């Protein structure tokens, strides 16, 4: 069985910021109410030109650059989204085209805000069985286009964005070590868009009733999250042979800071080991965990060997918990000489680039020596 190491990460957030003060001018709400009830200060809103596809492509290019891969080296693209550009075809196919991933299979995955962790689990399975070597997993949403901007129960909560990771087959025990996925379909109407699907296809009545907008029962979701997440967190930790204190960083779905606080209290995980960026982006649904993961890496919050707990929940209702062991990206010769990688990671002088290439080359050579003489590696560790 192979492991699926995360070797690249990227994110894209639209430039346009919508603050709580801006919302005060649109609906009957206040910065005080929104911040105290949710932890949100502002969110990003896509322009009419931005789509799930354009945002995903931007996030994926950043992830591929870090991984040192070209699009045509991908075997599979999974896009977790509930707001694709079209009902047909999948956004994944258009993303595949834009990335030049001509050898990749591609499909969308719908599991609400838990979708990215579902995608990580699915991508990992394809790698574990040996079927694929490189898998791109994306979480991307433009929920703003499904909001009723007169409905203060929902319009203050959501934002737009995309995050992506590249998985690579590896012998080292890194990447997703355990996961726990589930669904409670009896609660499907706690968060849904009633119209526009095959049950109520678009027609004047759908528009008149506002069924093309998101309907949400916030209290039901809140109760679901604070009861389900601690249970599944303990379950997945047990599957990985870990306890809450072994977790370096908890990256929860960014739906509500109070939900996160409640879950952390139950798991006794201190707040310094929790990653929160909801104040900047609001709830970006399936994009929230990959965006947060990407920012956590950029901020130096993860080191090789660290254990990360991902906790997602959302429409379905679904839940997804995963334990990921962070690994050192394997340096390959192609990665070393990839201009994408150098441009993305090393915005410095030519001399520094050369020095870093030399260091990286040494690392690759050392790695090869370790492969040839594993005993020497154990002694050096
Ligand atoms: O990605 C997963 C999807 N979503 C979630 O996970 C959401 C989970 N739920 C929540 O985050 C919270 O339930 C909300 C933030 C949505 C709501 O917070 P709450 O503390 O549960 O508020 P509530 O729904 O109980 O409403 C309390 C009051 C109500 O007024 P009355 O009936 O007490 O007079 C609401 O009408 O707050 C009112 N209210 C607002 N007031 C100002 C609701 N929305 C707003 C608003 N601004 N935007």
Image: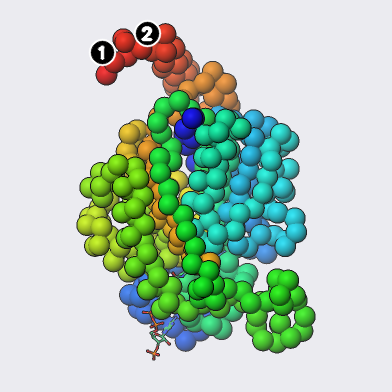
| On screen, residue 213 above or below 307 | below
Q: Position of residue 361 (x, y in %)?
A: 46, 15
The quadrant the C terminus occupies is top left
**Label 1 packing within 10 angstroms: few (<14), some (14-19), many (20+):** few
Residue at figure coordinates x 37%, y 8% from the top left: 373
The quadrant in which residue 360 appears is: top left
Q: Is mark 2 within 8 Å of ligand 1?
A: no
Q: Position of residue 346 (x, y in %)?
A: 47, 30
- Classify residue 129 as left or right of residue 320: right
Label 1 secondary element: helix
Q: Is residue 42 above or below residue 96?
A: below
Label 2: element kind: loop
Residue at the spot 45% in from the left edge and 29% down from the top edge? 329
Query: Are there few (<14), some (14-19), or many (20+) residues within 10 Å of tag 2?
Result: few
Farthest residue, direction right: 203
Closer-to-camera residue (101/379): 379
- Residue drawn at 48 percent across, 79 percent down: 217
Residue beneath label 1, please?
A: 379
Q: CA distance from mark 1 to mark 2?
A: 10 Å
Q: Position of residue 108 (x, y in %)?
A: 64, 53
Residue 21 at least partly seen:
no
Q: Position of residue 99 (x, y in %)?
A: 68, 40
Residue that mark 2 sits on: 373
What's the residue at 63%, 77% (across, down)?
A: 194
Q: Is residue 119 visible?
A: yes
Mark 1 CB near ligand 1 (8 Å cut)? no
- Residue 205 vertical position relative to residue 322 in the rendered view, above or below: below
Q: Nearer the viewer, residue 173 or 368?
A: 173
């Amino acid at each position: 069985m192979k492991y699926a190491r995360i070797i690249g990460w990227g994110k894209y957030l639209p430039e346009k910021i919508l603050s709580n003060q801006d919302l005060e001018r649109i609906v009957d709400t206040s910065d005080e109410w929104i911040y105290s009830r949710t932890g949100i200060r502002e969110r990003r809103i896509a322009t009419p030109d931005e789509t799930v596809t354009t945002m995903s492509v931007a996030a994926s290019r950043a992830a591929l650059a870090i991984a040192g891969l070209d699009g045509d080296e991908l075997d599979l693209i999974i896009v977790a989204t509930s707001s694709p550009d079209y009902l047909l075809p999948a956004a994944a196919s258009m993303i595949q085209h834009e990335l030049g991933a001509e050898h990749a299979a591609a499909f969308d995955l719908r599991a609400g805000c838990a979708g990215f962790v579902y995608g990580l689990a699915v991508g990992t399975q394809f790698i574990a069985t040996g079927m694929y070597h490189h898998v791109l997993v994306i979480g991307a949403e433009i929920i703003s286009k499904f909001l009723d901007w007169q409905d203060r129960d929902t319009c203050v909560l959501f934002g737009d964005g995309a995050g992506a990771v590249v998985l690579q087959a590896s012998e080292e025990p890194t990447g997703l070590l355990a996961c726990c996925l589930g669904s409670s379909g009896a609660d499907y109407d706690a968060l849904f868009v009633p119209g526009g699907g095959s049950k109520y296809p678009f027609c004047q009545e759908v528009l008149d009733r506002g069924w093309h907008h998101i309907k949400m029962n916030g209290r039901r979701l809140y109760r679901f999250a604070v009861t389900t997440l601690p249970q599944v967190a303990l379950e997945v930790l047990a599957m990985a042979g870990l306890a809450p204190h072994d977790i370096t960083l908890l990256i929860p779905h960014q739906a509500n800071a109070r939900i996160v606080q409640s879950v952390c209290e139950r798991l006794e995980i201190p707040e310094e080991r929790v990653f929160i960026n909801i104040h900047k982006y609001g709830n970006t649904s399936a994009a929230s965990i990959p965006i947060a993961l990407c920012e956590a890496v950029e901020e130096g919050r993860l080191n090789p060997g660290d254990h990360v707990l991902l906790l997602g929940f959302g429409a379905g209702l679904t839940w997804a918990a995963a334990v990921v062991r962070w690994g050192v990206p394997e340096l390959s010769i192609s990665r070393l000489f990839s201009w994408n990688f150098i441009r993305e990671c090393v915005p410095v002088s030519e001399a520094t680039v050369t020095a870093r290439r030399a260091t990286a080359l040494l690392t690759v050579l050392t790695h090869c020596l370790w492969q040839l003489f594993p005993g020497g590696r154990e002694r050096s560790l």
